[in-house]
Image: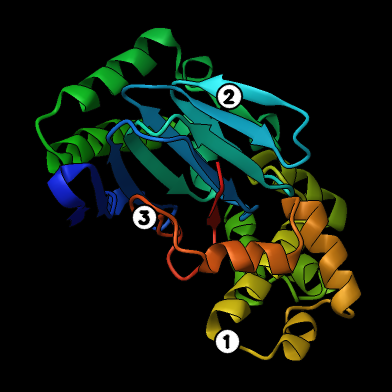
Amino acid sequence: MHYRSGPDRRWELAQALPHPLLRPGVHGYRGVRLAPGGPRRRLEVPTGEVTLFLGFDRPIRITDAAGARTESFGSLLSGPRTRGSTGEHDGGLYGVEVVMAPWAAYRIFSLPMSELTGRAVELEDVLGARAARTLTGRLAGAPDWPRRFAALDATLVRLHGAGPQPAPQVVAVREELIRTAGLVPVQDLVALSGWSWRQLDRRFREQVGLGPKAVARVLRLRGYLRLTELGRPPAEEAPAAGYYDQAHLCREFRAMTGLTPGRFLAERRTVKPGPPAPDWLSGEVTSVVLPP
């Protein structure tokens, strides 16, 4: 486990890998505790992953990229999407975040990912009120982060063992999309799956929540953001990530995040007061802290 805390323990961040039986589908656990302070907003870019947040204290508010809808959650399951969202709280936050591949969430929660596409739902609506409250209560009552993560392991391993098996073809095609940063031709994906395009698209929507073309679109954005962190010249980033030109990149970036690339990168480089906000997917740019 990796642990950090701020002055006077005004904040804590704890990170750990899940039980081996849950890997590689479940990527990691992150525990966070922030003492009450000023409002804090974080833009989450679309990554194609599923996020589970188990809240122990105050609710968080989730707003879609267009700013048209805001919902409040205690604990939530957020599905794959092609547009970003903004999470906001009053400065006090306490809970555990879990990031997983959609096909892993399909198995753990026995839920078609198409029901989560582009939205977040209260955990009680997925597990049932009693099971969700029991899980969050057990984690909140644990004396430290290692025992919280162990209790979470026990629940997720049990659910994982009882859930439906994802199709190996779906897992393989998604891994190929990730490996190529969404730049693999459609006919190659069809050949890899051994299915027709229609069947591949249908099974993807069931177990991934997005069709292969939408997943490729999200992964191109992820690839571009990785290049920005590596310091590639701006003129090279757009074509290297699969965009026709800078104008195409800017249109897609704004449609998917609500910000221009320049604004997003400027906010990434601005040091904000309070705890660090590490990206929750290793090697990827997943979020940026915005002004309150």
Q: Which mark is residue 121?
A: 2
Q: Residue at x 33, y 22 (%)?
A: 57
Query: Does residue 175 lie above or below 50 as drawn?
Result: below
- Give the residue at x 12% y 37%: 144
Question: Is residue 198 toward the left or the right of residue 159 in the image?
Answer: right
- Residue 119 vs 135, above or below: the answer is below
Q: Residue at x 55, y 27 (%)?
A: 61
**Mark 1 burial class by Cα count in 10 Å: few <14, some 14-19, many 20+:** few
Cα–Cα gap, marks 3 and 1: 31 Å
> Badge 3, how many Cα within 10 Å: few under 14, some, many 20+?
some
* Residue 105: assigned label: none
**Amino acid type for the residue under numbered disc 3:** Arg
Question: Circle 1 is placed at which residue position?
Answer: 231
Residue 56 visible in the picture: yes
Question: What amino acid type should be assigned to the residue bearing mark 1?
Answer: Gly
- Left or right of residue 20, residue 142 in this image: left
Residue placed at 54% from the left, 84% from the top? 230
| Rendered view: 171 above or below 56 | below
3 or 2: tag closer to the N-terminus:
3
Element marked by disc 1: loop
Of residues 121 and 18, which is closer to you in this image? 121
Q: Nearer the viewer, residue 257 or 194?
A: 257
In this rendering, position of residue 47 left or right of residue 243: left
When asked about the image quadrant of residue 134, the answer is top left
Q: Picture coordinates of residue 281 (x, y %)?
A: 46, 60
The residue labelled by disc 3 is 23
Structural distance between the alpha carbons of marks 2 and 1: 37 Å
Q: Are marks 2 and 1 in contact (CB under 8 Å)?
A: no
Measuring from the top left, give residue 86's x and y in whole percent.
61, 40
